[in-house]
Image: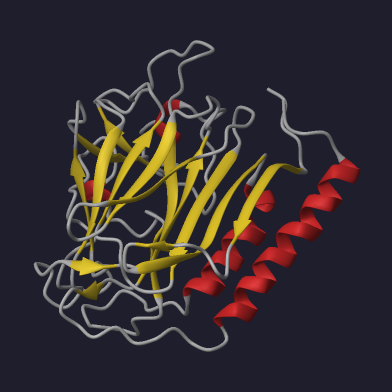
């Protein structure tokens, strides 16, 4: 398996005066693919900075201009493979499990799994350690039996009231087939906001897709992670050149804001943050073009 240490394909759409999407405006639209975590990290960090400060894991209505995250590594052993991962695990009235986010199986998907940690006697990385690589630490997430699922947001303080998020970013592992891994976002009325496909790269690479609006507008996200599911035991099925098993690592999302809560305007410094993100992509893209060919 060939693995470059340099950045692979980079794509960035940076918009300050974008057309209005329903009641909100798309301000950041980022898709990249790289050979390893080091290649993805500058863009993930820039995305975090634009989305806002980390609001942590408490069941409170935190800064609406902040963010929450999931990296799967804090999940207790009871919900890690070979056990089933509950879709509402990160929507509880307890610290550190209050993130205001829930996962629902759709299509053929039967449930969810988090890959086992090393040293627990179970296959790590869904028994595909040479294909699935993490962005942060070692655990990864996947739907089981199918490749589709929905993400919904809830008020972190009540866990039942619908909420909206300003943005969503996902790190995918081992995207190799173009168009097979997608994110579709919807507003509170079920209207589609946009669809983005994760960029495809070499085996073992990481892809990041992230979008941010100027106000909370995302009620639900429909995710398709490749076109070949992993099995109920956490073992991936075989693949051909047109088949792709894909898993997820970090999820980064804007603070879930209750639907009836007045939205606080974004900080005045946001355009500067977006400019920094665009400049970062430009500099690294030029460096990559000079230093290496695209991933193959």
Q: Nearest the camera: 14 or 118?
A: 14
Extreme residue in the right direction: 290
Residue 224, horizontal then vertical, whole percent: 35, 35
Q: Residue at x 51, y 34 (%)?
A: 132
268 lies left or right of 278:
left
In x, y percent, where is residue 200? Answer: 58, 32
Query: Which quarter shows the N terminus?
Result: top right
The part of the image, by quadrant, that contains residue 115 is top left
Q: How is the rendered protein coloured? A: secondary structure
Residue 166 percent coordinates (x, y): 37, 68
User: Looking at the rendering, which quadrant does residue 154 occupy?
Assistant: bottom left
Q: Is residue 36 above or below residue 242?
A: below
Q: Is residue 28 left or right of residue 95?
A: right
Does 59 appear above or below 188? Answer: below
Establish if 15 lies above or below 145. Answer: below
Position of residue 273 relative to residue 133, above or below, is below
Query: Residue 167's x, y, as percent?
Result: 40, 64
| Left or right: where 105 falls relative to 295 | left
The residue closer to the viewer here, 8 or 220, is 220
Q: Quadrant of residue 247?
A: top left
Q: Which residue is rendered at x = 50% and y = 49% of the image?
A: 209
Q: Is residue 245 left or right of residue 149?
A: right
Q: Residue at x 19, y 49 (%)?
A: 87
Give the residue drawn at x 22%, y 82%. Answer: 60
Q: Is residue 107 visible?
A: yes
Q: Quadrant of the C terminus?
A: top right
Residue 124 in sight from this viewpoint: no
Give the total of numbered labels. Answer: 0
């Amino acid at each position: 398996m060939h693995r470059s240490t340099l950045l692979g394909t980079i794509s960035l759409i940076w918009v300050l005066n974008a057309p209005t999407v329903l009641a909100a405006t798309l301000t950041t639209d980022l898709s990249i693919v790289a050979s390893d975590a080091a290649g993805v990290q500058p863009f993930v960090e820039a995305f975090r900075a634009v989305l806002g400060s980390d609001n942590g894991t408490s069941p409170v209505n935190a800064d609406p201009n902040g963010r929450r995250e999931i990296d799967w590594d804090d999940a207790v052993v009871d919900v890690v493979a070979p056990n089933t991962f509950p879709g509402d695990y990160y929507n509880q009235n307890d610290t550190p499990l209050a993130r205001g986010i829930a996962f629902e199986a759709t299509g053929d998907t039967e449930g969810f799994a988090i890959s086992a940690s090393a040293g627990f006697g179970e296959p790590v990385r869904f028994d595909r350690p040479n294909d699935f690589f993490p962005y942060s630490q070692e655990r990864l997430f996947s739907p089981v039996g199918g490749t589709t699922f929905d993400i919904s947001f809830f008020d972190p303080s009540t866990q039942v009231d619908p909420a909206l998020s300003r943005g969503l970013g996902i790190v995918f592992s081992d995207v190799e087939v173009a168009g097979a891994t997608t994110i579709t976002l919807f507003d509170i009325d079920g209207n589609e906001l946009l669809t983005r496909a994760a960029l495809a790269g070499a085996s073992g690479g990481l892809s990041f897709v992230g979008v941010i609006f100027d106000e909370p507008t995302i009620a639900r996200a429909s995710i398709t992670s490749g076109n070949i599911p992993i099995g109920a035991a956490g073992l991936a099925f075989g693949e051909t050149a047109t088949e792709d098993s894909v898993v997820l690592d970090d999820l980064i999302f804007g603070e879930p804001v209750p639907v009836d809560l007045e939205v606080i305007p974004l900080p005045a410094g946001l355009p500067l943050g977006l400019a920094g993100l665009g400049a970062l992509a430009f500099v690294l893209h030029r460096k990559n073009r000079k230093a290496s060919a695209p991933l193959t």
